[in-house]
Image (cartoon, rainbow, N blue to C red):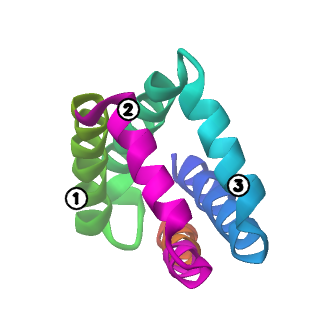
Amino acid sequence: MTTVISIFGLMIIALSAWGIVTSKPLINMVLVVLNRPWGIYFAVAVRIGLGLVFILAADETRFPGVFRFLGYLMFIAAALILFIGRQKLGQFINWLIKNPPGMMRAWLVLGVAFGSFMVYGAN
């Protein structure tokens, strides 16, 4: 299970780093997925899956309490995405797009840090 956490962490690092270098293609990819009929369900499924992996693998990680907490946080995030809905989520993404590029890059730096934590904590 910790291998799954590491793979997800590496994917988050790669996507975030790609977005730091050039954010437009990353934003376009997110918008394309979100606008598909299955897009919001995909986002929810990923969070539920990752939440389950975090909770089930927590005892095998360096920070079991943190990973267990993150797992439950993923469940909350999945519920919030369903509650917020596609339209409001799209509005939030459009709000992000309209902000200065430095703000988007700051969020993506946090993504690199989170992915790095996942990889470090899982090994």
Q: Earlier in the sequence, mark 3 or mark 2?
A: 3
What is the residue that sits farthest to the top in this orientation? Answer: 37
Q: Is residue 101 visible?
A: yes
Mark nearer the viewer, 2 or 1: 2
What residue is shown with label 2?
Answer: 87
Q: CA distance from mark 3 to mark 2?
A: 19 Å
10 Å neighbourhood of mark 3: few (<14), some, or many (≥20)? some
- Amino acid at the residue labelled 1: Phe
Q: Is residue 53 visible?
A: no
Is disc 3 in contact with disc 2, using a CB cutoff of under 8 Å?
Answer: no
State left or right for residue 7 relative to residue 95.
Answer: right
Is 86 magenta? The answer is yes
User: Picture coordinates of residue 82 (x, y %)?
Assistant: 28, 29
Q: Which residue shows up at 53% across the image and 70% down it?
A: 111
Q: CA distance from mark 2 to mark 1?
A: 28 Å
- Amino acid at the residue labelled 2: Gln
Q: Which residues are magenta?
A: 84-110
4 or 112: which is nearer to us? 112
Is disc 2 in contact with disc 1, using a CB cutoff of under 8 Å?
Answer: no
Compared to residue 89, the image places residue 21 above or below, namely below
What residue is shown with label 1?
Answer: 69
User: Picture coordinates of residue 35 (x, y %)?
Assistant: 57, 27
Query: Helix, strand or loop at disc 3?
Result: helix
10 Å neighbourhood of mark 1: few (<14), some, or many (≥20)? some
